Image (spheres, rainbow, N blue to C red):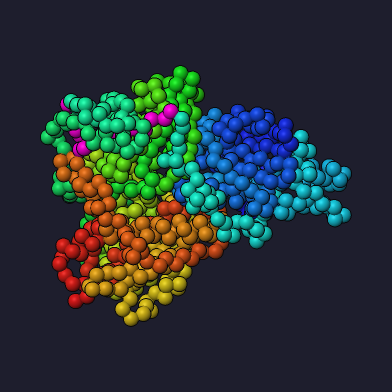
Amino acid sequence: MKNQDKITFSRRNFIRTSALASGGLLIGFNFFTACKETAQPPVDITKLNFNDFNAFIKIADNGYVTIFSPNPEIGQGVKTSMPMIIAEELDVPWEHVSVAQGILDTNNYTRQVAGGSQSIRFGWDALRQTGATSKQMLINAAAAKWNVDASTCNASNGIIKNANGDELGYGDVVNDAAKLEIPENITLKSPKDYNIIGKDAINVDMEHIITGKPLFGLDYKTEGMTYVSVARPPAFGQKINSYDATAAKSVNGVSEVVQFGDKIAVLASSTWAAMKGKKALKIDWAKDSTLENTSDHNKELNKILDSNSLDVRREDGNVKKAFAQADKLIERTYESPFLPHNCMEPMNFYANVTTDKVHLVGPIQTPAGTARRIANLIDRNEEDIHLEMTRMGGGFGRRLYGDFALEAAEISNITKQPVKVVFSREDDMAAGIYRPAIKYRIKASIKDGKVTGYHLKEAAINSNMYGLIPNFFPAGAIENYKVETGNYRSNITTGAWRAPYTNFLAFAEQSFFDELAEELNVDAVQLRLDLLSNVEDGKDPSIEYSAKRMIDTIKLAAKKSNWGNSSSGIYQGFAAYYSHNTHVAEVVDISLENGKPKVEKVTVAVDCGIVVNPTGAKNQIEGGVIDGIGHAMYGDFSFENGKPQDVNFNTYRLIRMKETPIVETYFVENELSPTGLGEPGLPPAGGALANAIKAATGQILTKQPFIKELNSRKTDLSA
């Protein structure tokens, strides 16, 4: 659809309006698709408190606009960028817009979720239509006042003008607009006319963040609230035999100790008292001979890779025949460990279960799903659940799983008092949910100087929650192509971790392609371009990436990084990957310092369509790159008898400030609809880093974390 095309939509399904008793216009809309057919905005917003509505745009009679955001803000910036889209089409100055967080409202709205880097992609059309519809209603009201045809009027910066030069502000006509029919046909702006989209905007929560005003889940408190620290099994698979709470109850501030399932909650007047009380508990944990070790996981995953009974996810051509006819075969196995999420803000949630309602407040990526689970857990109707979302101090997939919210609701239901569950850092790292350990085995055939076959096997812990992406590159680029997956069931809880599926797969595949390029005596970038030239966009609808867009992205990264012409002492590594509907290419520059790799710079090229907020977009890419490099280089996590071996940062290694590189980000310029940004920058980082280390040292890395593999070889990389 061209940007200047007229958009026709059902006003019944898309938008609602109401006049405000205090003056102004209230417009209901959905951030992702459209309002449900039964959705109705409140008639008089002045009679409601903040928590009684969400996901509406309010235009006041002074021309200022308030947008209520229904979706979780996890640091990805949607609370800023999504209102920017509305304000652009509404044609109101950005400084006249304020944004407020809405609550969960499953009756009126769908997909109140933060995950998968899909917020802007799903919201793009509906948000533009909302702003453009609002503007047209205001223009129509002004035209009626002037008794002229609306087509002779235009609006810009909150001012409506007619052909005679007359002017009216939005606030002058907003009350009249509230009485008009919603226009069926609107015209969206051309990107060349954007004044807000594509311009840098400061995060709307920035003042609260830097001044420490209440904003995050940990900030929330109410009168009479009790803090809770929960003792959970120290090893996955353990259960409670018995416990003695005498010492815990003697801690000053501890008010109550209750068991729920195989957990024990300590309630107190402060987090310090609750956590101190938890440490004083004497618990006899049942021994279980099935407790798992990392060494056991490695054996089981190797068995899966060696077996012939995996699930085939995609098969093109005849890989077996290609291998039989090959001049040469190359095979490599790649390994990654479990990883915790390590959000800056540990898990926390408030719950107050009463006979009237269940009041929930906290940082959650899946408010609707969590509310449903809580309703089932405590046997309440979903209509009883009132859930307010706070800003999240990181999520990375961890807050998709509302286990901490369920704990709060269950404890409140048992104790009949308002409670706030707060995790310590040790709780946060020991309780799961982790990125699962995964192994990939890749085998390829070369015939007459060409890659003729490609076979990828995945063996993963709980892979039904993860799984391979069979339709990403190099699907379609190699004639004989096969992908298979196998699963080992574990009682260690696993789930989505930033850039699910691709955060480790990208390293494995992109490292392997560098080996193929070396074997073929072809430049690493050129090999990718040659393979992509085999793909015709649209010919195979199952192929999810665009070969043309990936080629353009790769060329931009190569140009901006000065690929192949680096300075003396600088070694480069390349990787390109498609994930979350976005194409990314990265070049890592490293040097060797005392024989160890030092990442100097990462050059990133991104095709994510139209960039709504460049500042926010760059922040997302830079954060993803540093996250990807840090975890690929240092992230390690193991289990002994079901127990995590690292539960705080004194032993768990994260990237440090002095190790973070300069990240230069460049966007492919086009007028295509926006795609994801929170996650796609991470997957190529590990592969580009591994390839740079290989360029510097000749050493092929197959295991993460890289530093562990390098140290195990006990070689001076500068030698």
Q: Position of residue 411 (x, y in %)?
A: 35, 26
Is 299 on the left-hand or right-hand side of 54? left
> Which image quadrant: the C terminus?
bottom left
Quadrant in which residue 451 is drawn? bottom left
Q: How many marks?
A: 0
- Residue 113 or residue 583, whichever sits in front: 113
**Residue at figure coordinates x 65%, y 58% from the top left:** 195
- Residue 509 or residue 365, whichever sits in front: 365
- In the displayed structure, 174 sits above or below 45; it is below
**Residue at figure coordinates x 63%, y 43% from the top left:** 66
- Which residue appears farthest toward the front when viewing the image? 252
- Which residue appears farthest toward the bottom when viewing the image? 568
The stretch in magenta equals 224-241
Q: Position of residue 69 (x, y in %)?
A: 56, 41
**Residue at figure coordinates x 46%, y 30% from the top left:** 223
Is 467 on the left-hand or right-hand side of 157? left
Quadrant in which residue 136 is drawn? top right
- Which residue appears farthest toward the top when viewing the image? 355
Is 165 on the left-hand or right-hand side of 415? right
- In the displayed structure, 85 sits above or below 418; it is below
Residue 565 visible in this rendered orientation of the protein: yes
Q: Is residue 226 magenta?
A: yes
Residue 330 visible in this rendered orientation of the protein: no
Q: Position of residue 175 (x, y in %)?
A: 76, 38
Q: Position of residue 419 (x, y in %)?
A: 39, 30
Q: Is residue 210 magenta?
A: no
**Residue at figure coordinates x 22%, y 34% from the top left:** 280
